[in-house]
Image: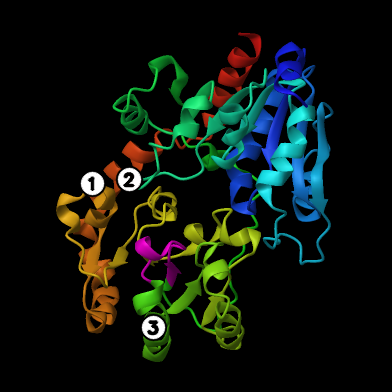
Amino acid sequence: MAATSWRRSVTERRAAFLFLGETLLIPHLFPIVEALAAADPNLPVDLWVSTSMHEELLGGWIADLPNVCIRRAPGFRKVAAIQGRNPKLPAKLPMLARLAPVLSRSRVAICAEQTSLWLPTLLPMPTRFVKTSHGVGSMSARDDRRRRSAARTLVPSERERATYLERGMPPDDIVATGYVKAGFVHRTESRPNFAQTRPVILYNPHWQHHRSSWWDWGEQAVQAIVASGQWNLIFAPHQRLIEKVPELRTLCAKLNERDDVHCDYDSFAAVDGSYTAVADIYLGDTSSQLLEFLIRPRPAVFLDPREIAWESDPSYAMWACGDVVTDLDALLPALAAAAASHTRYASKQATLASDALGDVSGAAAERAAHEILTVLHG
C-alpha cells in the first residue's frame, strides 16, 4: 500500500494486540487484553498471532471474552510442538510488512516488544501504537529511536518512568502502571517433581553474550551444583539462549535423566513465573526475572566471571542484592551461605523490586487498559 493511501485510510474503533514474538511476551500482554475487554465490552479486540502455539494458548483463555477474536497474521506458521513450548517463529519484519495494511484499520495497536514499533517509525500509519514493557531493570535499551514512535509507553514504575524523562521523552507519553505480569492468572504452576526435599536453586542465565554467565561458567556451574548433592536445580535459561547455544538440547536431555535437576529452556512455565515462584535461591547474571523473584525477597547469588567493575555501573544495580561470585571455586560456598547471609540483602531486594516493578497487586492491567482507551479516544 502506498504511503498516501495510509494517510487517507479511516481507522475503525478497534484494538489490535500483537502476539508475534516469543511466548515470554504473553504474560506481559494478556492481562491487558482481559482488562480492556472488561472495561469496554463493545470494543472489538483482535489478537494477532504468529504461530499455532500462540493461537492454542490464547484460545484457551478467551471463552469468556466475547469481544476478543484471535486472528492469524500474514505468514502464520503451524507448528508441531508440545503445548506451551516456544516455537520457531516466522521472520517478524516480513510479517509486519504484510500485516501493516490490515493493521492500519485499527485505531490502536498494543505491543510488548520494539520490533513492532518499526511500523509507526517507518510508515505514516494512522494507527496509534501503545508499547508496554516486557523487561525491567537497569539494562533496558531505552535509547532506541523506535520508542519515540509510540503514542504511549507503559512502564511499571515511577523510577522506570524517570529514566525515559531523562532522555527527553514527553511526560504525557510515559505512564507508570505497575507490573502487568503480576496480574497474569494463567500460570502453569509447574513444580518439578524432585526425588528429595532440598533447597531449590533456579539458574537463569541471560541469552546475550555480553550480559550472560553461560559462555564462561554456565555448564561448570551446573555440574558443580549437581555434583555437590546439596540442592535441587531448576536450569531455566532465557528462551533465546537456545538460539545461540543449540547444544543446550543435548545437555538438558542428559541432565533431565536425573531426579535432582529440571531443565527447561522453552516451555511456557519458564516464562510465566512458575519457577521464580517455587525457587529458594536465585542464581544468575542480568536477567530481569530476578526482579520477579524478588517480589518475595529470597537469597540471590550472581555470577561475574569477567570481574566487571559493577559497583559504579548503574546497569548492575541488581548485584547489590546478593553475593557476587568472581571465582568459580567460590560458587558452592556462596550458595551454601546464601540463606544465612540473606538478612544483609533483604531490605535492598525489597527496595529494588519496588522501585523497578512498582505496584505488583495485579491492578496494573486496569491502568494500562485505561491508557489504551485514552489513546483510542484521543
Residue 20 in view, yes or no: no
Look at the picture and state if 375 lies above or below 313: above
**Residue drawn at x 43%, y 33% as measured from the top left:** 359
Quadrant housing the N terminus:
top right
Query: How far from the left and from the top, in percent, is residue 30?
Result: 66, 39
Residue annotated with mark 3: 225
Q: Exactly how many numbered labels are in the figure?
A: 3
Residue located beneath label 2 in the image: 138
Decide if residue 68 is in sight here.
yes
Residues in magenta, as a range: 201-213
Q: How has the structure been colored for display?
A: rainbow
- Label 1 CA crowd tier, 10 Å (few <14, some 14–19, many 20+): few
Secondary-structure class at tag 3: helix
Q: Quadrant of residue 185?
A: top right
Element type at marker 2?
A: loop
The three-letter code of the residue at mark 3 reads Ile
* Residue found at x 40% / y 91%: 227
- Mark 1 touching mark 2, by CB under 8 A? yes
Q: Nearer the viewer, residue 125 or 272?
A: 125
- Name the residue located 50 percent from the left edge and 67 percent from the top edge: 237
Residue 21 lies, with reference to residue 189, above or below; the image says: above
State which quadrant residue 151 falls in. top right
